[in-house]
Image (cartoon, grey):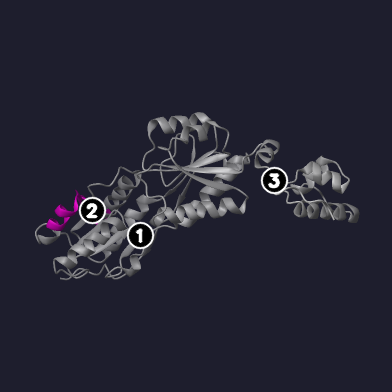
Amino acid sequence: MPASSSPDKPATIYEIAKQAGVSSSTVARVLRGDVKETWPSTARRAARIRRLAEELGYRANWRAKAFSEKRTWTVALFYTNTLKILDGIHAEIVEGLNDMLQSRGYSLMLMPVESENFERTVQGSRLDGYATMAETLPAAASKLLRASGLPEVALNNAPNDGASGVVVDDFRGGYSAARHMLELGHRKVGFYLDSEARAHYSIDERLKGIKSCMREFGLDGGPEVFHVDHNEIKAVLADPARRPTAMICYSHLEAKPILSFMYQLGLRVPDTLSVIGFNDDQSDVTSPPLTTVSYNGHRMGKVAAQLLLRLIDRDQSADPHSVTLKHHLTVRGSTASIKS
């Protein structure tokens, strides 16, 4: 029976090597899975080394592992404090990113760029690569990240020049939302963006898609844009002269208050107003269930992780480029043909 190592001082590969009667380098190769066990004698020796490691309570030293493999096996997701990183579609993206990284043996670190540890983490050789997710990264943080030379992928945001990214085809998303409303007979179409919404490339892209579709239907003016707070949009909904018959909302965060305000005003959706939103966050349990244009957040995170891992592995097929995901229109009870 091998002597147990102290619980306060885990066994080293040298102790395992001594009891197994082999070199420390042999133990290291076996424990990192770098030994071909094609011969019975080799397989028996490897099994004995692994058994001794377990009995002695050996735990791999991640610093030594990182030094020997020239990897930290850690990837960071950097974001801004203004982003609700674990809510709604963002939570799905993070889950997809983490699932793929874990399947390849990587750990995911979540860190806002405002953190006091941000600069030390980027410059301290603690990462193999990073992803970013933010409406807009502060200039200083973006400059620091680019200077690091680490592999990078932007998530749901326009990537830095020459960097990789995974984005959504928001132009086609806006186009699909408008086409759905126009095919239902609506011609007085509005686009609602909350006054506190932060600048993001998707706002412009969705509007461009809506305008493009409306031009195809002979409506050159585009939608009436309501970039207002809750009080003002409620006033719009209460006024028949100002209220559109169809409202395309920038996201579910704008669509759900519209449904609530219509209820408070005693007006029915979709009889008086058809409503469509973006991002399918519990939109099937609203009243009425919300028609949405959405994308698969989990897939976005997974695709971003795959791209980042290829960059880390220096896979030439992963030279910096953007991957564009498609939206999906889900029709529910909040949209209907216009009443004549």
Please indicate whether residue 172 sits to the left or right of residue 243 in the image: right
Q: Residues within 10 Å of mark 1 (few under 14, many from 20)?
A: many
Disc 2 versus disc 3: nearer the observer = 3
Of the residues under marks 2 and 3, which one precedes in the sequence? 3
Q: Which residue corresponds to the image point at 87% horizontal and 55% vertical from the top-left?
A: 44
Tell me the quadrant of the picture where the C terminus can be found: bottom left
The secondary structure type at the circle numbered 1 is strand
Question: In which quadrant of the rendered view does residue 287 lie?
Answer: bottom left
> How far apart are labels 2 and 3 at the CA level?
54 Å
Q: Which residue is mark 1?
A: 293
- Residue that mark 3 sits on: 60
Instruction: In the rendered view, tell whether residue 83 sits above or below residue 150.
Output: below
Amino acid at dot 3? Ala
Would residue 149 be found to the left or right of residue 90 on screen?
right
Q: Residues within 10 Å of mark 3 (few under 14, many from 20)?
A: some
* Left or right relative to 327: residue 60: right
Q: Is disc 2 surrounded by few (<14), some (14 to 19) or many (20+) residues within 10 Å?
A: many
Q: Give the Cα separation between the discs numbered 3 and 1.
A: 47 Å
Q: Earlier in the sequence, mark 3 or mark 1?
A: 3
Q: Is residue 52 left or right of residue 259?
A: right
Please tell me which of labels 1 and 2 falls first in the chain. Answer: 2
Q: Position of residue 250 (x, y in %)?
A: 29, 53
Image quadrant where residue 331 sits: bottom left
Residue 183 numbered mark, or none: none
Per the image, is 303 magenta?
no
- Mark number, residue 192: 2
Q: Residue at (27%, 68%) from the top-left corner?
A: 334
> Residues in magenta?
216-236
